Amino acid sequence: MGKLLCDSTPIAESLKPPHALLPWPDLCLSAAELLPEPAACGGWDAVTGLEEQQRRKLEGIHAGGVYWKNPQAAGAAATGMAFRLAHGGDVEADGNCLFTALRRAMGSKIGARELRMRMVRRFLEDRGSDDGPGRIAVDAAIRHLYSPDLQAGWGIHVVQEMKLLARKADRQALDSLIQELVALGLQRESAAESIYKERCLTVTDGQSWAKYMSISGSMEDEYDIITLQYTEEGLLTVDENRDGRAAAFGDDIAIESLATEFKREIFVVQSHGRDAMVDDENCVFFFPHRPRGEIQETPLFLFMKGTGWCGAGADHYEPLLATPITPHISQDNATVVL
């Protein structure tokens, strides 16, 4: 599962200016060799949960291809190439789907948890080199996503969530404090809300986001995720995550850090059904996430099935396998030009 910001470009650009541009042609072969074979993954007719207009659009993109140029290259080095996108199969919806899907799209042997930790380290390294407007912009985005102002936003959202981090070592003590309030007459959820908000770490800036995004739902995690859900009327539910299995869902900031780590653009291909009130021709969107530096390899693609226009638009990442189209085609003949 995941969250998408409407436009991630300002955050990416503000954290770190790009390095010198690299020539493009030398990068094609090594990138193509890393891509997995799409033949074993089936076509879009095998993907569940798609409406007919979504399936037709995605099949058309697969047939006509996607044309990409290195956006940092210029002149002769700006020669592009076209890819055919195939669905890379289902991945488990366990909160780690961003990392599981990306490793499959890369054809990588890196484990999902290791990929998550590399992303966090990259984010902290880049954050440490920026103490100006870039850091302020990222912290504001994090607060908006994970500690929203509950006095606002109800014109867009029916439910808003607040994420809190409880140390695994403190869970028994927290339970005892909650039980003390219950013994005084408070309802369990109200008591839990009070104790968790008082004693747990809120996700409000880059440092707390890094702790949150390190959580993979395993016993190796330092923290458990507590989720408070609110409607405009007040507290709706408290997800106490008693078994510690909840993982931090990837977001735009995580994808940008992964793009930076691997020096590749990452496109999230988002497909909406009729509930999003878009016409058939515009039911598929390509959202770019550029590295905060140089691009050295061909792009990666992830797929998200939209679940409606609210709630950030989608909730689960799946891999897309991109294979170069040969013989090469011009951008005029491609279905999508990025």
Image: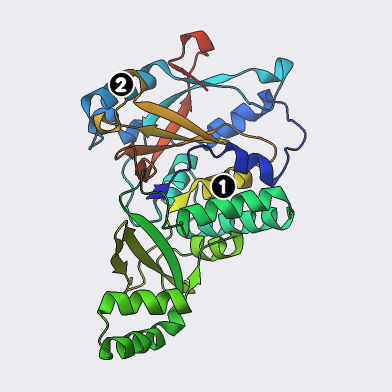
Rendered location of residue 47, percent (x, y): 26, 35
Q: Residue at x 62, y 59 (%)?
A: 121
- Snapshot colouring: rainbow
Lateral position of residue 55 relative to residue 7, left or right? left
SS class, disc 1: helix
- The percent position of residue 5, horizontal first and vertical second, equals 48, 42
User: Residue 15 or 254: which is nearer the viewer?
Assistant: 15
Q: Is residue 10 left or right of residue 47?
A: right
Q: Earlier in the sequence, mark 1 or mark 2?
A: 1
Tag 1: Cα neighbours inside 10 Å, few (<14), some, or many (≥20)? many
What's the CA distance linking mark 1 and mark 2? 32 Å
- Which disc is residue 279 wearing? 2
The location of residue 159, given as percent across then percent down, is: 32, 53
Say the numbered circle drawn on residue 258: 1
Residue 31 visible within the image? yes
Amino acid type of the residue tagged 2 in the rendering: Asp
Position in image of residue 115 (x %, y %): 52, 54
Q: Could one spot residue 264 in this view of the protein? A: no
Q: Tell me the residue at 40%/66% (across/down).
A: 217
Q: Is residue 67 above or below residue 246?
A: above
User: In the picture provided, is 243 more to the left or to the right than 84?
Assistant: left
Q: Toward the viewer: 115 or 94?
A: 94
Residue at 32 percent of width and 56 percent of height: 232
Mark 2, secondary structure of its residue? loop
Placement of 324 over or under 30, stated as above or below? above
- Foreground residue among 2 and 336: 2
Q: How many numbered discs?
A: 2
Question: Dot 2, crowdedness within 10 Å: few (<14), some or many (≥20)?
Answer: few
* Residue type marked 1: Leu
Looking at the rendering, which quadrant does residue 59 occupy? top left
Frontmost residue, 25 versus 210: 210
Q: Quadrant of residue 186?
A: bottom left
